[in-house]
Image (tube, rainbow, N blue to C red):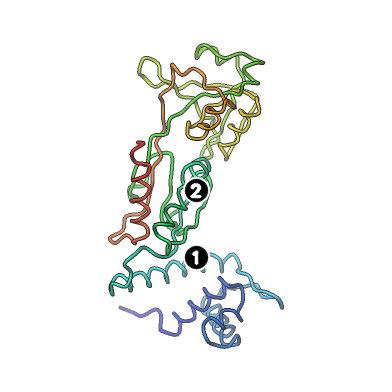
Amino acid sequence: MQRNFDEMQLGTIELFCQAAELGSFTAAANQSGVTPAAVSRSIARLEERLGVRLFVRTTRQIRLTDGGQRYYEQCREALDRLLEAEREVTGAQKAPAGPLRISVPTPYGHYRLLPMLPEFRALYPEVTVQVHISNRNIDFADESYDMVVRGRDPADSSLIARKLEDAELVLVAAPAYLKRAGAPKSLEALKQHECIQFDLPSSGRKIPWQFKVDGKQIDVMTSGGYTCAEDVLGIVTLARAGAGLAQTYRYIVERDLADGSLVELLPQFGGTSRPFILLYPHARHLSLRVRAFVDFMTARLGKRG
C-alpha cells in the first residue's frame, strides 16, 4: 500500500490541531516542547502542501479560515480515532473517553438530552460532549457527527436506528386565551379558533395536527394568524402568552399543565405520538464512548417507547 503520510507530516497535523485549539502558535509550541518558530514553519509547510490557507494571522492572534476549520474537524476526528485504536489494541482504554458529537432537534435537546448529560458525564468523566441543537438535518459524511436524534425513521439504510421513545402529543392553551375565546368542544370547533402553526424545516409545509377518533389516527389541518418556523418551542411560547391553541409534545409542557399555566384540551381525542430515533453510522467497531451513550440513552428513554 502506498504511504501518504510520514512521521513528520503526522506530527505537523498534531501541531496544527494544537494551535487551532489553543488559538496560538506560542501556546502550541509550549505544550509540544518546541519553539514558536518551529510551529510556524510546520504550519506553513502544511498550507503549502495543501494549497490552502489554514489560519488568518494578525500580530495578536490567529484564527482558522473556513477551510482551516473544516480541515481541523476532520484531522481532530482522525487523531482521536488513531488514539482510540491504539488504546483498544493495547488494552489501555478500559473506559469510554474522548469527544462525542451529537446533533439533536431543539425541543428534544432542551427537554430531554441536555438535562441527562450531567448524569452521563458523571458515569463517564473522560468523555467530552459537543451538542449541536438544530432542526437542520446534518450530513454524517461531511460534518463528523457521531450520532443524531431525529423525529422520524431514516431514509438512509447505512444508519443504525434505535428508537428512544414515542412522544405523546397534547393540545393546549393558556387560561387567558380560553377566557377570551372559550374552549373547543369538538375537532370541528377548531376552525373557529386561533391555531398556532409550525412550518416543517425540510419543506416549509405546515404540520397537520394529529388526533385519535375511534382508535384511528387522523390528521387535521388548522389555521391561524401565527406561524413559527425552525424552532418548534416558539409555538409553546406563543401559547403561554395567550396567542391561541398549540399542539406540542407533552414532555415540553408537563410543568405548565401541572401549575396551570396551560390547560389540556380535547383529551378524548388525544393519545397520538411521534417517535424519536437515535441514529448512528454502521461501523465494524463502534467506539466505547458511542456504545456507552447509546446504552445510556436507550436505558433511560427506551422504556417510554
Q: Nearer the viewer, residue 108 or 258?
A: 258
Q: Horizontally, is 88 left or right of 176 in the view?
A: left
Distance of label 1 from label 2 (alpha carbons): 23 Å
Circle 1: element type = helix
Q: Position of residue 138 (x, y in %)?
A: 48, 51
**In the displayed structure image, the side of residue 23 where residue 4 appears, left or right:** left
Residue 183 versus residue 20: which sits nearer the camera?
183
Q: Residue at x 65, y 16 (%)?
A: 179
Residue holding disc 2: 114
* Residue at 62%, 33% in the rendered image: 237
Residue at screen point 30% across, 78% down: 1
Please state which of residues 213 and 115 is positioned toward the viewer in this rendering: 115
The residue that label 1 is drawn on is 73
- Label 2's element? helix
Q: Nearer the viewer, mark 1 or mark 2?
A: 2
Count numbered badges in the picture.
2
The type of residue carrying mark 1 is Glu
